[in-house]
């Protein structure tokens, strides 16, 4: 294990997936650009990284890269128009995204999987520990996750992943961890990892969610990780190598109990828009009575059927 106690300043945000669950919205636009209330999902992710002190961000981008790069760039004509109107509130909203961090971009080429996307950051990251934040995975800013993960990685000098309890019938959608308790109730030692197991094969109901603090050792492992589940080079498979190697310092998991939304999933996306809009001072008071009215008028049975269908669809 390398001695690696320098502060963590770099974050990698993979945003090169095909986003097939959200077609046709994602035909000409990356799913990370879907608006959640009035900001693209990826801006929340960049804000989260910046709030944890990570001011050097590398985005891994795929086709339709321009929308992402443009969003984090200046738009002079818009600035001039708003300046002329004297609309400083909107002007600062427009400019906020280009002042958050130093943002770099690298192309993934073919989307060969999350592990492959992370490997594309090797040159930029060099020999440092770094964070990975999935560009379609939102952590509610009212609930802390990344900062405690970074602190834990500094304290233990190891790789840290984020875990969250999910219902047994959903575990096949995630990477899943076998774990042992530690003396901290919020931290577990990871003894094994398996990508998208069936409910019967899952070693626990702890799912890997989209935040990681990795050490540079991961790159050598990713270089030789063969395609796994779905024919993709899986980050989970590389992490399993570390978890199984006692000399590596192992892998630890921070168990998250807060609010998290997978905006690449249609139902979760809709939930994220509603929850975050309801929490906003400028929108919540107007929206809440309407949501209450809508909920009160919803019939029980059709919803239950729809839920069943959704579960069946997810299981296939
Ligand atoms: P997902 O599995 O959710 O993305 O990857 P996907 O493949 O785009 O999803 P669907 O199933 O087709 O809808 C998790 C994260 O990893 C990125 C995605 O952009 C997302 O942020 N990713 C995935 C890459 O950057 N490259 C890849 O090859 C795969």
Image (tube, rainbow, N blue to C red):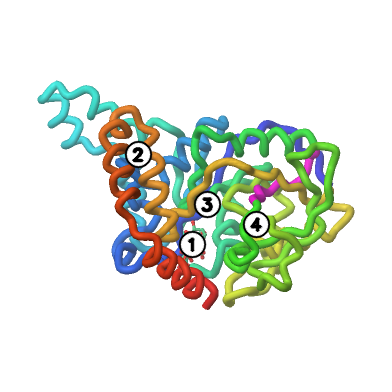
Does 269 sit left or right of 242 as displayed?
Answer: left
Percent across and percent down for residue 226 are: 67, 73
Q: Is residue 137 one of those drawn in magenta?
A: no
- 163 up-or-down from 307: above or below: above
Outermost residue to the right = 246
Of helix, strand and loop, which one carries label 1? loop
Question: Few, some or many C-alpha atoms within 10 Å of disc 4 (few <14, some 14-19, many ≥20)?
Answer: many
Of helix, strand and loop, which one carries label 4? strand
Q: Which residue position holds label 4? A: 207
Percent across and percent down for residue 218 are: 70, 55
Between discs 4 and 3, the one toward the N terminus: 3
C-alpha span from label 4 to label 1: 26 Å
C-alpha span from label 4 to label 3: 14 Å
Q: Which residue position holds label 3? A: 134
Residue interval drawn in magenta: 156-164
C-alpha span from label 3 to label 2: 22 Å
Q: Give the mark toward the camera: 2 or 4.
A: 2
Q: Which residue position holds label 1? A: 108
In the image shown, does 124 or 8 lie closer to the viewer?
Answer: 8
In the image shown, does 99 or 45 lie closer to the viewer?
Answer: 45
Q: Which residue position holds label 2? A: 277
The reply to whether dot 4 and dot 3 touch (C-beta < 8 Å) is no
Q: Give the mark toward the camera: 4 or 3.
A: 4
């Amino acid at each position: 294990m390398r001695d690696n106690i320098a502060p963590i300043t770099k974050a990698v945000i993979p945003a090169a997936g095909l986003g097939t669950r959200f077609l046709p919205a994602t035909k000409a636009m990356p799913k990370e650009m879907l608006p959640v209330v009035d900001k693209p999902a990826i801006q929340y992710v960049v804000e989260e990284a910046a709030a944890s002190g990570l001011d050097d961000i590398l985005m891994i981008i795929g086709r339709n890269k321009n929308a992402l790069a443009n969003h984090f760039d200046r738009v002079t004509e818009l600035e001039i128009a708003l300046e002329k109107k004297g609309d400083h509130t909107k002007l600062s909203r427009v400019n906020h995204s280009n002042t958050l961090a130093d943002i770099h971009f690298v192309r993934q080429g073919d989307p060969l999987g999350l592990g492959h996307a992370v490997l594309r950051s090797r040159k930029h990251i060099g020999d440092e520990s770094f964070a990975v934040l999935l560009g379609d995975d939102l952590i509610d800013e009212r609930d802390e996750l990344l900062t405690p993960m970074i602190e834990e990685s500094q304290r233990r000098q190891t790789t840290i992943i984020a875990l969250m309890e999910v219902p047994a019938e959903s575990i096949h959608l995630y990477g899943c961890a076998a774990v042992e308790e530690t003396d901290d109730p919020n931290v577990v030692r990871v003894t094994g990892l398996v990508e998208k197991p069936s409910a019967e094969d899952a070693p626990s109901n702890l799912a890997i969610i989209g935040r990681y603090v990795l050490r540079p050792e991961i790159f050598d492992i990713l270089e030789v990780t063969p395609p796994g589940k779905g024919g993709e080079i899986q980050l989970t498979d590389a992490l399993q190598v570390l978890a199984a190697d006692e000399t590596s310092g192992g892998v630890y998991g921070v168990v998250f109990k807060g609010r998290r939304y997978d905006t690449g999933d249609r139902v979760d996306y809709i939930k994220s828009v509603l929850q975050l809009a309801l929490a906003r001072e400028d929108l919540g008071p107007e929206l809440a009575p309407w949501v209450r009215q809508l909920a009160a008028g919803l019939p029980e049975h059709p919803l239950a059927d729809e839920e069943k269908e959704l579960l069946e669809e997810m299981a296939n």
